[in-house]
Image (tube, helix red, strand yellow):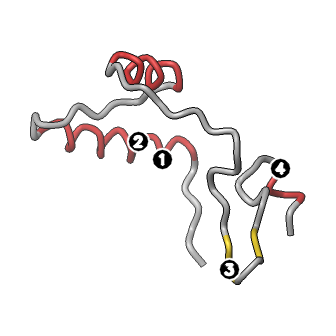
Amino acid sequence: MVPRLSACRRYKNLDKLIHHINLNGTVNAFYSTPSIYTEAKHAEGLTWEARFDDVMPLADNFHHYWTGYFTSRQGLKK
């Protein structure tokens, strides 16, 4: 069994990891938010294809599709 780390210890480990990644100078790792990520992607000026169908169907057999597998409320799916 793998021992669980406290949230405080996890963040301390992440802080160390971010510090060592940033020492190289080629990457700028930092804690982010969804809005920062969205603003950065928008600043790239990319255009995205609009899709209205199931964009990520998963099949494990012919005509056996796992629709709705990648969705919320995973605890209700057993």
Tell me the distance, in whole angstroms, between the alpha carbons under discs 1 and 2.
5 Å
Tell me the distance, in whole angstroms, between the alpha carbons under discs 4 and 3.
22 Å
Q: Secondary structure at mark 2?
A: helix
Amino acid beneath label 4: Arg
Query: Disc 2 designates what residue?
Result: 12
Mark before the other along the chain sequence, 4 or 3: 3
Tell me the distance, in whole angstroms, between the alpha carbons under discs 2 and 4.
30 Å
User: Horizontally, is 47 left or right of 57 in the view?
Assistant: left
Query: Disc 3 designates what residue?
Result: 60
The x and y percentages for residue 59 are 68, 73
3 vs 2, front mark? 3
Q: Looking at the image, how many numbered discs can be counted on the residues?
A: 4
Mark before the other along the chain sequence, 4 or 1: 1
Categorize mark 2 by other alpha carbons within 10 Å: few (<14), some (14-19), many (20+): few
- On screen, residue 62 above or below 13: below
- Residue at the image position 43 percent from the left and 17 percent from the top: 39
Q: Secondary structure at mark 3?
A: strand
Amino acid beneath label 1: Arg
Tell me the distance, in whole angstroms, between the alpha carbons under discs 4 and 1.
28 Å
